[in-house]
Image (tube, rainbow, N blue to C red):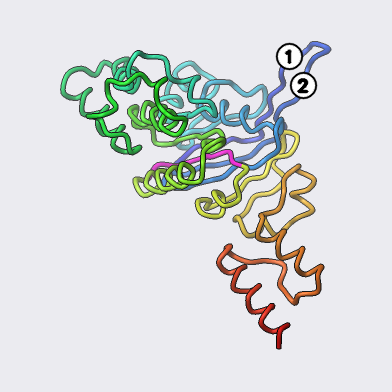
Amino acid sequence: MGIALQEVGFTYLPGTPMARAALEGVDLSLREGETVCLMGASGSGKTTLLRIAAGISSPARGRVLLDGSRADDTASGRRRLRAAVGLLFQSPQKQLFAESVEKDVAFGPRNLGLRGRELSQRVREAMEAVGLDPQSHSHRSPFTLSDGEMRRAALAGVLAMRPRFLLLDEPTVGLDAPGRRLFRELIQGLKRRGIGVLMASHDWEEVEALADRVEVICEGRIVHSGDARSAAGDPGMLHEAGLASPPTLRVLALLRGKGLDLPTRASSPREAAALIADALGGEAQ
């Protein structure tokens, strides 16, 4: 069971001289417990796709299904979709607004009618899930937090709604290495809980660590669907989509150009390092 976009199209300012097609003929699916990484250059349609999958925007063409039933063509269908899906924007400031972290995280569940112990438990569990200590963070203003903590607080507000699917728009942009590592661990934990994750990302380390499937979008169309290895191994497709190859593959290519006997691919930076060490050892002999 999951979400499916079928032949989805979307145009900004239709019928005007400023009309711009953002999506055209997009097919994409997301199952519970699956992590799909969406890669594409700026302006390729990633954010528009996430908004449609979350039920915030409606497609101009095509349809969105939830568990096999259409969910984009009626008010009740869109409510059902929004109840199943949580969306974390790229800038956490867009989602944080209350005077304390606790009130921010509680906002969604409170609107569902939760009160008292049930509400407090929902808030505490969501904060703990993202690594924020309820005792030390509940009463802090969200705007006094670090960038990484703000993203986690915003994510806690989404998780407090207990979505089945989580959509993330470049969640680690601007974070330092420890912050990116923590966010990857959080996403892996959500997957273990059976939550489906659709994540827009440019970070190959992130994609290779998390993705069950990679979808590459270029000018509003999906141009590749497969695992991270197949995406990384198609430099022509990546170039046309405005994306760089993984750093490990670029290093291997550079060293091959210097005469080292190296393959075109490596499954991880560790494997690439071992291959380079072997090649250098062989050359020394």
Relative depth, front residue between 69 and 165: 165
Q: From mark 1 to mark 2, how far is it between C-alphas?
A: 7 Å
Read off the residue under disc 2: 20
Residue 144, compared with residue 271, is above or below; it is above
Read off the residue under disc 1: 13
* Residue 144, percent from left and from top: 40, 22
Which residues make up the magenta segment?
A: 194-201
The residue located at (72%, 45%) in the rendering is 243
The residue located at (78%, 48%) in the rendering is 239
Residue 259, compared with residue 164, is above or below; it is below
* Residue 153, percent from left and from top: 38, 28
**Position of the N terminus by quadrant:** top left
The residue located at (67%, 66%) in the rendering is 265
Relative depth, front residue between 177 and 240: 177
Helix, strand or loop at label 1? It is loop
* Residue 75, percent from left and from top: 48, 16
**Position of the C terminus by quadrant:** bottom right
User: Where is residue 15, by image quadrant?
Assistant: top right
